[in-house]
Amino acid sequence: EVQLVESGGGLVQPGGSLRLSCTASGFTFRNYWMSWVRQAPGKGLEWVANIKQDGSEEYYVDSVKGRFTISRDNARNSLFLQMNSLRAEDTAVYYCARIRPGGHDVFEYWGQGTLVTVSS
Amino acid sequence: DIQMTQSPSSLSASVGDRVTITCRASQSISSYLNWYQQKPGKAPKLLIHDSSSLQSGVPSRLSGSGSGTDFTLTISSLQPEDFATYYCQQSYIGPPTFGQGTKVEIK
C-alpha cells in the first residue's frame, strides 16, 4: 500500500524558515517524480514544486521561486521542502504527492498533509 | 499559465441524482485533464486522469469526458459517499493548475 506521511509543519513568524518532510513507503520511491501541493485554509489547491526521480530537475510555482527548495533522499525514501522567507500567504496545508508515471503532472497519491501557519 | 474554471461552484443534489460538473481551460489542453475528490479534513483523491481514464478502485458511476478546452465529470447516480468537493486540474503544459472547486452538497 502506498503511504506518504508529511511532518514538520507548525507556527512560524513571517520571515522565518521551516523544513517539511515526507516519508514514503509501499513503492519504489526512487522511480517516481514527487511533488508538493498546498491548500490555504478554506481555499483551493495550488501546486508548489516538483522534483525528478534522481533530483536532477526541480520546478517551482513563481510565488515560491528563490524562497523554497525541494529535495529528496532516495536512500531514506524521503522528500523535503525547505521554506525560507515565509510570508503570511504561505499559510496552508502542505501535501506531498506522488506523480503518476507518464510524463505529465497527475498527482496519483497524496499524504495527509501538514499545516504551516505563518503569523506573528 | 493556463486558467481552469469550474462550474458550478456548488450544487445541491439528492441521492440517486445525476450530477455533472464542468471544467473549462483558458486554452486547449488536449486530454490532459484530471479530476480529484476531497472530503473535509482529508487529502484529495485522484478519480480520473487524462480526461476519461478511471483511476483504479474508483466506482464506475463516475465518468469523465472532453478534450480541448471543455470537460465534464459526471456522477450517474449520486451516493452518500460522493458528497465532497471536486477539483479539475490540467497537466498539459506549464505549471499544473487547478480549478477553484465544486462543492456537492446534500439537498
Image (spheres, coloured by chain):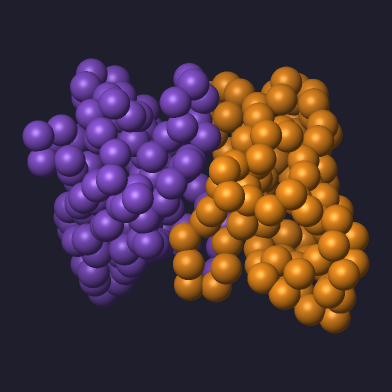
Chain colours: A purple, B orange
Residue A116 seen in the current view: yes
Residue A54 x, y percent position in the rendering:
21, 22
Report if residue A62 is visible in the image.
Answer: no
Residue toward you, A84 or A116: A116
Residue at image location 77% in from the left, 40% down from the top: B64
Q: Is residue A102 left or right of residue B18?
A: left
Q: Nearer the viewer, residue A66 or B56?
A: B56
Residue A17: percent from the left, percent from the top? 17, 55
> Can you name the residue that lies furthest to the left here?
A75
Q: Quadrant of the C terminus of chain B?
A: bottom right
**Can you give x and y, in whole percent of width and height, for residue A89 in the image?**
41, 58
Residue shown at 82% from the left, 43% from the top: B72
Viewer-nearest residue: A104 or B97: A104
Classify A117 as above or below A22.
Answer: below
Q: Quadrant of the N terminus of chain B?
A: top right
Residue A117 position in % (x across, y down): 32, 68
Q: Quadrant of residue B97?
A: top right
User: Is residue B56 found left or right of B15 in the rendered image?
Assistant: left
State whether residue B17 is above or below residue A57.
below
Rendered view: B77 above or below A20 = below
**Residue at 82% of width from left, 50% of height from top?**
B74
Judged from this view, the residue extending furthest toward the right is B17
Residue at point 18%, 35% (across, down)? A72
Q: Is residue B7 left or right of residue B86?
A: right
- Give the image quarter of residue A114: bottom left
Please identify the quarter of the rendering in which residue A91 is found. bottom left
